[in-house]
Amino acid sequence: MGKVSKRAIALLLAALAMTVVAACGSDDDSSDSGSSGEQGGEIKIGTTGLDNADPVMFQTTQAVQAFQLAYVPLLTYAHKEGADGSEIIPGLATEVPEPTNGGKTYTFQLRDGLKYSDGTAVKASDFENTIKRLLVLGSGWSFFYSPIIEGSEEFQGKGDLKGDISGIETDDQAGTIKVTLTEPDTKILFALAEPYAAPTPAAKSPAKQLKQPPPGVGPYVLDIVDFNRQYVLTRNKNWSDIPGIPRGNFDKITGEVSDSVTKMTQDVITGQLDFMTEDPTGDQLPEVRAKYADRYSEQANPPNVYYNFLNVTVPPFDKQEAREAVNYATDSNALVRVFGGRLTPGCNFLPPGVVGYQELDCKYGAPDGKPDIEKAKQLVKESGYEGEKVTYWVNNKDPRPAIADYFRDLLNEIGFDADVKTLDQQVYFEQIGLKKNKAQIGFTDWYQDYPHPGDFIESLLSTRALSSEVTFNQGFVSDPELDDQLDELRPEDPEGAADQWADLDDYVVNEKAYVNPYGFEESSSFFSERMNADDCTGVHPVYKNDWLLFCKK
Amino acid sequence: MATEPATEFALEGPSALQGEPRRRGTAGMGPWRLAFRRLRSNRVAVVFGFVFVVLVAVCLAAPLWADHVAHTDPYKNHLTDTVIVDGEKKDVVTPDGIPIGPTWQGEFFLGADGNGRDTMVRLLYGGRNSLLIGVAAALITTFLSIVVGVLAGFFRGFTDTVLSRTMDVIWAFPVVLLGVALGTALTLSGLQIGPVDISGRSKLIPILIIAIVYVPYMARPIRGQVLSLREKEFVEAARAQGAGSLRIMLSEILPNLSSTVIVFFPLMVANAILLEAALGFLGVGVQPPEASWGTMIGDGVKHILSGPHLAIVPGVMLVVTVLALNIFGDGVRDAFDPRAKIHLEH
C-alpha cells in the first residue's frame, strides 16, 4: 500500500490545490509600488488590457484611460472630476475655435514648440494623417469624421493614405489646420477632442495597424511590453506643459493585464495593485463594499447603458415581433443580481445624465417590474421563428458569462433554441462589429464618449455608423426615418433639442425595438490603501477615471 | 511535469504469471482467474472500486434527482425565485448577488450558484460529463496507443522512427499546457477536417484533446512490450506457419497486451478526469451552460467567501473519484502483474 498511499496523497493534494490556489489568490503584499510621497514613484493598475495597440483603433473604456495620457488631440476634455470634465478645452490647439462659413468650418492654430515624445516637431499635416489612417484602417470611430468632413467619403472610397481629404487643409509652416464640414454638426468638436483624433508623426504612422503605439504628445509615453500581460506609461521627457492638462503625479504607471477580475480585486485589497479598471464581482463585491468602504466608491459615471444588440439583418431579429419578445421577457431584476446590485434597471437607450434622457413609459412594462413571458412566447410564435437557432454572443469578462447564461435560458424559455458563443474580451467588440460574422444577439454596453446624445443614438444605430468596417451599430440598423431625424438634429444644440432626442429614444426602444436595454451600471473606483481615494478618484465623465488626477495619500 | 511511465519490468500478460511459483490453492488456475482472485483479496482496491461504481450510478441518476426531487434542470436560472426553507421564504439569489447556501432539502439541496442554478443538480450532471469525458478519452487513448505501440514495436525501422519521434514531440509539451493550448484554439474555432466538423462547444473537443495528449504515455510502454513480444517463440512459430504481419499482430501480439491495457485503463481514466477538470477550470474544457466538476470549481471560486461549498463540493467529488480510480487501478496492477511498477507520473 506504500505506493498507493503516496499516489493517493499526491492526487489529493493536486486536486485540492486547484481549488485552494484559485480561491485564495496571493496574500503577498511585499511589492513596492513606488515612493511614499505624492509625486513620483510608480503605481500599478489592474486591467483586462487594451483592445488594440493602435491609437486610432482602440474601442474600450479600459483603453481610453491609458491612451488619453499619451495622446492629446487638438482639443481635449477638462481634467476635472464630475460634470466639469465634460468641458472642451484647448489641447494642442491654442483655443477652441468658433465655427465660420455657416457653422461648417473650424480653424485651429497649433501651439508653438510642440514635440512628440521622440523629440520630433508636431506638424499640422500629422493631424490629417491621423484622420486618414482612421478612415483607411476602418476604425470603429470613422463615422465620427466621415462623411461629416468634406471629402472624407471620397477619400474613404479610394482607401489610399496618399490621397487627400479636401475638407482638411493644413499648413505646416503656419501650424494651422482648417476643417470644413459638409454640413454643420454640433458633435464635431467633441469628436476632435477624442484621443484617437490626436496627431501622431506621419512618418511613423503608416497605413497599417501598429503593434506598438507611435510617439504622441502627452504627459506620458505608452509602451506595450506584452500586449496580453503588461503595458507601461512613463513620463514624456519632451512634454511641454499645456494649460489645463496636468503632468500626472507618478513617474511610471504600469498596466498589469489579466482576465481574472477576482485576482485583480484581491491584488488591490492586498496592495499589489493600486487601482483596477474593472469592477469587483461575485462575493468580493459585498466584501469590498463592507471592509474597504474608505477606498471604494460607486458612481453612475460615465453615463452608460447596458443592452443587447439585436441584428435586424438576420433571422430571427429581422422581425420586430422577435425583438419585442426579448424586451418583454427581459427581467432587469434578475440582471441586477448578476451585477451584484450595481445595475439600475431601465429601458431607456439614452442613459440618465445625457441630454435628452426622459424616463420612458416602457411598453414592455416597468423596468423594475416582472417580465411578461407569456406575451414574449406569443410574439415569438407570431414572428414565425419558434424553435429558431439563436446564438448569444458574449465576452469572457465577469460577469458577462453570467449575463449570457441568463439570456440563453430566457431565449430558450420564450421559444428559441439558444446557445452561447464566448469570445475573449480583447477581440469581442471587433468581432460583433463585423457584418460577416452575422452575430444575431449579444451582450454590449456603451459608455459616453462625449457628452452628446448623438454619441448613443447616432454612434450605435445610424446608417452612418455602418460605414466603418468594424461598426458599433452591432444590430446593423439602417432606418431612413431614424437617419432623417438624426440629420435634422445634427446642427442643433443638443440642449435645445432635448425633447426630440427623447422622442428618438422612444422610437428606437418602444416603436422599433432595435435594442434591448436593461439598465445602467454604477461603475466602481477601487484603490489600494496607498492611494488617496478621498480627493483623487479621478472620476471623469469621458475617461471614466482620469489617471492624471490620481494621487497617493 | 509529465514523465515516462516507469516500467521496471516488461509486462508480459497473464501468461507471464504461469512461470511464477504457485501458491497453495492456486494450482491449475488460469492466469485470468488467478488475477481476479488476487484482485478480490485486495479489499482496499475492491472497496474503492465499489466507491467508483456508486459514483457512476449516482451521476447516472442525475435526471431522477432533477425531475423528482429538485424539480429543475441543470441549466435553469432562478435569479429572482424564492424558496421556502424552514418555513421562511428566501431569495435564491439576493439582490446584491449572493446565492443561497445548502438548504438540505430537495430544492437547492446544496444551494445555488451565482445564476440561481441548483448546485446539486449541476453537480450530478457535471459528474456525468466528467466521467463521460474521462472514460471516452481513455478509450480513445487506449485505442490510439495500441495502434501506435504495436505498429512501432512490430515493424521497427522507419515506421518506429516516425511514430516514436511524433510521440516524442507530443511528450515534449507539459500535458496541461498542451491541453490548454489545443483547448483554446479548438473551443474558439471548432475542428474541421474534411467532412468532419466538430463545433467548439462539443464535448468531443475536450475528449479528443485529452485523448491525444496522453497517447505517448501509454504508447511507449506498449511499444516496449511489443518489441519484446515479437521475439518470442510463439511469434516465430506463427511466422513459420506462414502467418502475415497483420495476423501475427492481431492474434499473437494483441492478446498478450491485454494485461497492460487493463492495468493502464483505470489510471488513464483518472488522469483524463483530472485533466478535464483542469481544462474546465481554465475555461477551455466543457463549455457553458454544460457543467463539469472542473467548470464548477472555476465558477465557485467567485463565491468562495459566501459559498465555499460551490468550489469545495465538486473538488471533493473529483478527489474521491480520482482516488477511487487510482487505488482500484493499483489493485488491478498488483493483481495482473505484481512484478510491474507501472504508473503515470505528473
Image (tube, rainbow, N blue to C red):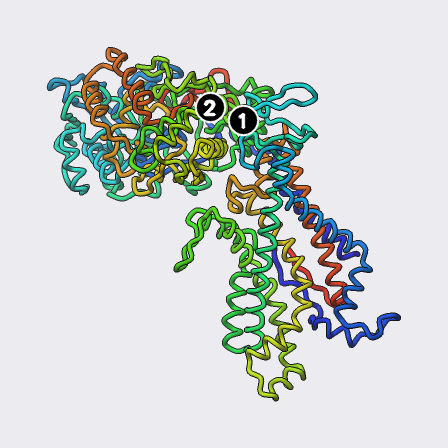
B207 left or right, relative to A181:
right
Q: Residues within 10 Å of mark 1 (few under 14, many from 20)?
A: many
**Residue A161, relative to residue B217: is it above or below?**
above
> Is mark 1 in CB contact (under 8 Å) with mark 2?
yes
Q: How many marks?
A: 2
Residue position for label 2: A331
Residue at 32% over, 35% down:
A55
**Residue A412, relative to residue B340: is it above or below?**
above
Q: CA distance from mark 1 to mark 2?
A: 10 Å
Does the image show residue B140?
yes
Q: Quadrant of residue A177?
A: top left
- Name which residue type carries label 2: Asp
Residue position for label 1: B79
Q: Position of residue A484 (x, y in %)?
A: 19, 23
B35 left or right, relative to A199:
right
Residue at 58% over, 32% down:
B113
**Residue A187, relative to residue A197: is it above or below?**
above
- Name which residue type carries label 1: Leu
Q: Quadrant of residue B259?
A: bottom right
